[in-house]
Image: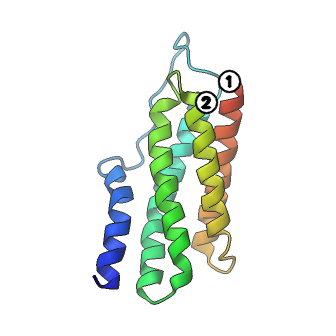
Amino acid sequence: MNRKEMLTVLALPALALLEGSGTAAPPSTHHGSGAAPGADACARACADCLVECARHLHHCAHRLADGQRTYAACLAACQACAASCAACIPCCFGPVGALSAEACARLCDHCATECGKFPDDAAMRDCARICRDCAKACREFARAAA
C-alpha cells in the first residue's frame, strides 16, 4: 500500500462522519427538556471542533503526503477528536451527557497538544485553540451535568 492509499484509509472514517453534516447546528433544547446547563454550549463547541478537525485531517494528510512524517500523530489525534465530537453532540441532551463530554474533553486536549507541536503552522495553531475551547465547554457541561 502506498502512502496516499494509507492516508486515505486513515482519514476516511472521520470524513464519513462529516458526510452531509456541514456545519449543522446541534439539536436545540427548550425549557423543560431536562438537559443540564451547558448542554447547548457543549454541543455547539463540539460541532465547531468537529468541522475544524475534519479540515485539519486534510491539512495533515497533505503534509504527510509531502513526506512530513511528524504530522502522523496529529492526523490520528484530529481523527479521534472529530469522531468524539460527533458522538458527543447528541449525548449532550441525554442521560450519558456528562460521561460523553468528559471523554470528549480528554480527546480534545490530546488533539490540542498534538496540533500545538506545530507553532509555526497557523492552521495547526487554530485547530489547537478550537480543541482547547471545546475541551473547556465539555468540562463545564460535565461538571454541571454530574
Q: Which corner quadrant holds the C terminus?
A: top right
Q: Which corner quadrant holds the N terminus?
A: bottom left
Asked which quadrant contains residue 129, the reply is: bottom right
Residue at (51, 61) in percent of width and height: 78
Residue 71 in the image, given as x and y percentages of width and height: 53, 77
The tag on residue 98 is 2
* Total marks in image: 2
Residue 132 in the image, given as x and y percentages of width and height: 68, 53
Mark 1 element type: loop
N-terminal-most mark, 2 or 1:
2
Residue 103 in the image, given as x and y percentages of width and height: 59, 42
Q: Nearer the viewer, residue 122 or 92?
A: 92
Residue at (44, 30) in percent of width and height: 27
Mark 2 element type: helix
Residue at (50, 38) in percent of width and height: 88
When the figure is inspected, residue 134 is found, relative to residue 145, above or below; the finding is below
> Dot 1, how many residues are within 10 Å of its Cα: few (below 14), some (14-19), or many (20+)?
few
Q: Is residue 14 left or right of residue 94?
A: left
Amino acid type at mark 1:
Ala
Assess whether mark 1 and mark 2 are in contact (beta carbons under 8 angstroms).
yes
Q: Is residue 58 left or right of residue 131?
A: left
Amino acid type at mark 2:
Ala
The tag on residue 146 is 1
Asked which quadrant contains residue 123, the reply is: bottom right
